[in-house]
Image: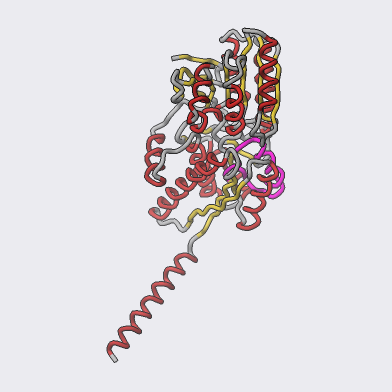
Amino acid sequence: MIKKLTVLLLIAMMMLSLGATAAAQDDMDIYVLGVALPFTGSFGTFGQDFERGIDLAVAEMNAELEAAGSSIRFETASADTEQTPEGAARALQTIVQTTGAQVVVGPLTTAEVLGAKQFADENGVVIVAMASSGPAASIPGDNIFRVIYPPDTFSSKAFATIALERGHENMVVLHVDDAFGNGMNEQFTKNYQANGGGEVAAFAYAPQSTELSTEAAAVSAALAGFGDTAGFFCVCFPGAAEAFVQVAQIDPVLTSVQWLGNEAMTSDEMLEDPGHAQTLANANFVTVSQSADTTPLTPIFNEAFMAMFDKEPGIFTNYAFDAANIAMLTMLAAGNDGAAVKSMLPFISNHYIGTAVQAFLDENGDQAIASYGIRQVLEDGSGFYVIGTYDGNNDTITYK
């Protein structure tokens, strides 16, 4: 009889405990933070790593909210943009319609951001993008905030200045045929020619292309036509960049000129191939990449990321971490409401100092502080090192 009562008592205590836990969960205010990133395709590794940065930000925020006795907790809901404008629109729609999320971190590229723009604007959903930089998305009054990476109107000036400093009388540009690549080519050409540069021959490749032998032949012919003083500028996504370098490394013209390129060409995969690495080293490859700055939070983020995922964060993963923090801080201040977040986010962003630079938005909702590092390939092709900085706000390059 005593044993039976003891068992019944234990069962009752367990039921009370489960009931208390369920009640505690019911008392929680869950804010869903959407995550729309490319988890497949040539940018899949970026998207996966960016999601880890967001997960770290959410985990840290929830721990702080619990310690403070707050009833608010954040959860994420992710969808793959498939690295296309159409995929980004579907991803955003899926997240919002299945979870009711009012704020979404991502997408990654400008083409994806513009693909998701209509649904976001029409449904009052706020997009907080961490790395989109194409000028085409610099639109005042919409629901898109590009909080960390500044528009390419800045970096294009640095690339043009470097090309002229190197004595390139003419340039050949290979660029992805999307909002980012077209915008960078247009801005670079304008700045290059406005400051004394000559002709610019531009060739575009389809965004999903992974075979660029035809484009490589066209670039090679254009460079040969310009002569010894021409330079080459590659505005390429990782997969396409690797495909281009694979062909270029056996082309006598492409291996005899100096190269410039966007930061996507600095991926670890590019340098893992000794031939690719040596090709870039021989070309004195230089990139302009935001940002060369650090803050006291930078090593803290790196250590926390290593502790949580047992790996180092990839390039720009800290931007995803910062974007998520800006989004969550705004939601804590304004509530889980898209219209209120849209109104409050510039104020929060303009008072946020993250793992790289302070976020400060212009009238288009874009990062207005333009601080870049100028990086060059080591002679042995083993990595990149900073050779200078570019201050976009003063349009000045300082070399080490």
Q: Position of residue 366 (x, y in %)?
A: 60, 33
Residue ranking furthest to the left: 2
Q: Position of residue 197 (x, y in %)?
A: 66, 10
Q: In the picture provided, is 2 more to the left or to the right than 276?
A: left
Q: Position of residue 6 (x, y in %)?
A: 30, 84
In the displayed structure, would residue 25 be above or below residue 358? below
Residue 193 sits in quarter: top right
Q: Position of residue 381 (x, y in %)?
A: 46, 22
Give the quadrant of the N terminus: bottom left
Q: Residue at x 53, y 15 (%)?
A: 396
Look at the image and give the residue range highlighted in magenta.
105-127
Residue 178 sits in quarter: top right
Residue 112 sits in quarter: top right
Give the quadrant of the C terminus: top left
- Colour setup of the view: secondary structure
Q: Residue at x 53, y 40 (%)?
A: 45
